[in-house]
Amino acid sequence: MRVLTIVLLLTLITVNQHGSAVNGGDFAGDYSKLSGIIIPGFASTQLRAWSILDCPYSPLDFNPLDLVWLDTTKLLSAVNCWLKCMILDPYNQTDHPECRSRPDSGLSAITELDPGYITGPLSSVWKEWIKWCIEFGIEANAIIAVPYDWRLSPSKLEERDLYFHKLKLTFETALKLRGGPSLVFAHSLGNNVFRYFLEWLKLEIAPKHYFQWLDEHIHAYFAVGAPLLGSIETVKASLSGVTFGLPVSEGTARLMFNSFASSTWMLPFSKNCRADNAYWKHFSGGSRHGHHKYHCEEQEFRSNFSGFPTNIINIEIPSIHRFDAYPSVAEVAEANLSSMECGLPTQLSFSAREISDGTFFKAIEDYDPDSKRLLYQLEKYHSDPVLNPLTPWDRPPIKNVFCIYGLDSKTEVGYYFAPSGKPYPDNWIITDVIFEVEGSLFSRSGDLVEGNPGAASGDDTVPYNSLSFCKNWLGSKVNITRTPQPEHDGSDVQVELNVEHHHGEDIVPNMTRSPRVKYITFYEDSESIPGKRTAVWELDKASHRNIVRHPVLMRELWLQMWHDIHPDAKSRFVTKAKRGPLRDEDCFWDYGKARCAWPEYCEYRYIFGDVHLGQSCRLKNSSADLPLHYL
């Protein structure tokens, strides 16, 4: 392993000396001086207290720099105090009068949310990612985390924390420090943050220097698990609450979630509805602070469900209007006795467009106090002077874009809500859930549901149509390669070259699939925009929350970047012909043959402390040239 690392570092030095460029990247600089900038997702940054809060009836108080998100000990012992440090004013996003929290800084803020012997592995986020970087010899100052307060809207991030100014300075500092551009790794909501940053940058830099700045400071963008058309689970969290395994009630989780303006940032929206381009309007003399018209194409009204598999919300609305909020069960019974016909609830259905444009929240405004707050924040997003985030993405103007996500996991795509008879915040109950499962729709009871399911299902959090929207960024001809995720010798690789791709249509590979094998499918530009390349990676059964810890993803990222730095690389993308072991951990014991698997690369080499045969299987010293197979 150490020999492999030394060879990789020597390769970097060789590139430094020759200043060679890689055909795929069109970058004639020093690749050993690349920096990696990590933008974490929702709830993936530690928050620390920035005030003193005395918690009555609890021995644990909150003092400056105490961990708030996530300190499970204080959450269990003083939940009311903890909530004061977490919730924000739902309108102006200010802190609770008694407690303030701010995001931590540095890599430690994103590696583990709740460090500890028991809680650490359970709350690990980017720790494995950092471990891979260290194992392959990446220097400490080459990996930079840019944590942010994931509770805030993008405009508030800039207003309160100057986050996007700081992010711009981070890129410029990395260029001066290392001498080369950066690689951007964004996960989940972090992709929305990066998209907003790119639009904010247009208004910060003169138009003629914008693309030049991007070319100088960003070499590649890895969009991991990006909710490109929003996340349906956001609706569930807004109406009934999602605890994510925390020891709080769903009502408490809902109260906290709806106090965050970022909750609106992840709402699902239609791919057929857009806002006016604020960038061109600004530079053509229009007002930067004007309201940008939100309009939908005719396709939106001709198609069903706004491009999603089904209606996202099906909700029972009572026809009784004399109550400010949902009445109790006894009140409903009394009303029904007086007027049976008028007392029956009405079931309404809402698509992604009707959620993002506020139609749904206006429909339940008389029955739910949170609707007014969400409508207020929704209006803020639609009138944002930089970008209306509830509009479909265009391909970021970056040389190299890699869109990566998991698929074919059971993913929620629709809900049935009804009044629970309880007071706010528990006034809604989910009566049924619709799931997409590998190209089909099922209810929670297992019944088949009609709709428009996609070719696959999502990553257990974000639906497939939202994740795969980045396929629209590919060129007119695409090379498709499907390989098994574990190590393979190349005999089981399936390839389709120059597949026709029409904008707006999904690309479905005509390939065999074994139900027992997990695959990774690569979609790569065959004929692309000059000087740019785009790729989409689909990983079978990769979970949304765990994909940044996925060893196969880490392997492919490393090989692609190693391919990019090598002066002898001729292809635009790393070869998929074979995948051998890269680390000692990739070697294992083959009990059928009573030897280490991959004998050409791995050997049995016992080191004191090994507790099983597989642990003693390690890379041979002669395998130092292994990465040369991937050029």
Image (cartoon, grey):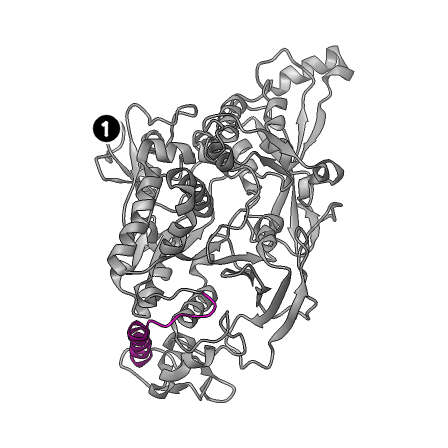
| Front one among 80 and 10 | 10
Front-lying residue, 184 or 515:
184
Classify mark 1: helix, strand or loop: loop
Q: Residue at x 48, y 29 (%)?
A: 285
Q: Residue at x 31, y 73 (%)?
A: 12
Residue 77, image quadrant: top left
Q: Is residue 13 magenta?
A: yes
Residue reaching furthest to the right:
341
Count up the numbered dots: 1
The percent coordinates of residue 373 (x first, y second) are 49, 24
337 or 193, nearer to the observer: 193
Q: Does residue 336 appear in this view? A: yes
Image location of residue 313, percent across then percent down: 65, 35
Question: For the stretch drawn in magenta, what is the main secondary structure?
Answer: helix
Residue 251 position in % (x across, y down)? 49, 31
Q: Amino acid at mark 1?
A: Asp
